[in-house]
Amino acid sequence: WEEYAIPFWIIASDGVTYSKPKKKKIVVLSGGQREEMLLRFDKPGRYVISQQGIQGLQFFDMRGHPHDQILATIDVLERDVDVDDPNVNIPIPIDEMEFTPGYKEEESIKASDIVASETIVFSMGAMFDQVPFPQYYVNGHPYDPNRIAFHAQPGEAREYTLINANHNAHPFHIHVNRFQVKEMGSELSKDTYPVLQSVLDYDPNVWRDTVMIPPNGRTKIWVQFKNYTGKTVIHCHFLAHEDTGMMSTLFIGKKDWVFRLEEHIQWILGIVAGVGLTTIALLVYVKRDGRDMYSVVNMNEIKAKTMD
């Protein structure tokens, strides 16, 4: 399909404008990603925007899903234009356009800015006797609004390695703060899944709030935390996944220690049981090894010593 595709230009991603357009023929979007494009048609005719070649990347290699389909049809009509007419605006070549960028170049995150690295694993469970089925996890845990899994401080930059343990795509989304993609990879073969070449085509200077973690793959991002403080979330941007557990809470700011009985009940029961068993063992030991000072024999010995 790339052979017959005409080029288009992306001018913004996830709401952040580029300084110059980026020319492409194919773009692969995951759930929640947004791309702003400029289209140019040099000849009249009927053009289509289509979805092609992504079968097998989702739904555990089920061929035919998501299926190829036409997303839009555009009819371009021929019209005579007098280029010498002063009222006619001659378009600027797209490659030469310049925009005010959403982020300045000097705002890009540097390796020296990174204060910590963490791993975030998106995974699924298949326990038939549990609801919901299947189960969705972040680092092995379903979503719990009372559990803060990640912390960051305002103004710092952190590195996160995002792992996808499944043969389906998981779009990673973070609220409030944007990031830059620094690495992408997949264990799947590009020969078997040619579209992977486009999935893994990323720009390390682009700022995003959503990125695909490729099937059986990984994505490394650098997040710049701004001045916002408080609780926010990270999650998979497939609604069915995030609503059934693939979400986790991130707290930006100073850690507050809050005692929750349910989080410490195992430790408390363990300590109580340990103290109880130790006390019983000591009582048994003393009873076996020690002598009763009030027994008849002991009283007679004390009396004899007193008389002496």
Image (cartoon, rainbow, N blue to C red):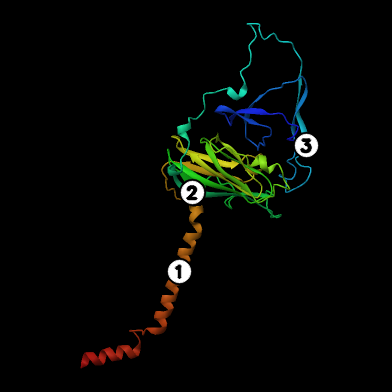
Q: Are marks 3 and 1 in contact (CB under 8 Å)?
A: no
User: SS of the residue at dot 2?
Assistant: strand
Instruction: Say what amino acid the circle numbered 1 marks.
Output: Gly
Circle 3 residues within 10 Å: few <14, some 14–19, many ≥20: few
Q: Residue furthest top?
A: 86
Residue 195, x across and y down, in percent: 70, 41
Which of the labelled discs sits on residue 72, or is there none? none
Residue depicted at x 56% and y 36%: 209
User: SS of the residue at dot 3?
Assistant: loop
Circle 1 residues within 10 Å: few <14, some 14–19, many ≥20: few
Left or right of 203 on screen, residue 75: right
For mark 2, what is the residue?
117
- Quadrant of the drawing holding the N terminus: top right
Circle 2 residues within 10 Å: few <14, some 14–19, many ≥20: few
Residue 208, x across and y down, in percent: 56, 35
Left or right of 227 on screen, residue 126: right
Instruction: Say what amino acid the circle numbered 2 marks.
Output: Ser
Which of the labelled discs sits on residue 68, or is there none? 3
For mark 1, what is the residue?
276
If you read the primary sequence from the N terminus, does the residue marked by circle 2 or circle 3 appear first? 3
Instruction: Say what amino acid the circle numbered 3 marks.
Output: Asp
If you read the primary sequence from the N terminus, does the residue marked by circle 3 or circle 1 appear first? 3
Could you say which is closer to the camera, residue 180 or residue 175? 180
Left or right of 170 on screen, residue 256: left
- Quadrant of the drawing holding the C terminus: bottom left
Q: CA distance from mark 2 to mark 3?
A: 39 Å
Residue depicted at x 66% and y 47%: 215
Which one is in front in this view, the residue at disc 3 or the one at disc 1?
Answer: 3
Q: Residue furthest left?
A: 308
Q: CA distance from mark 2 to mark 1?
A: 42 Å
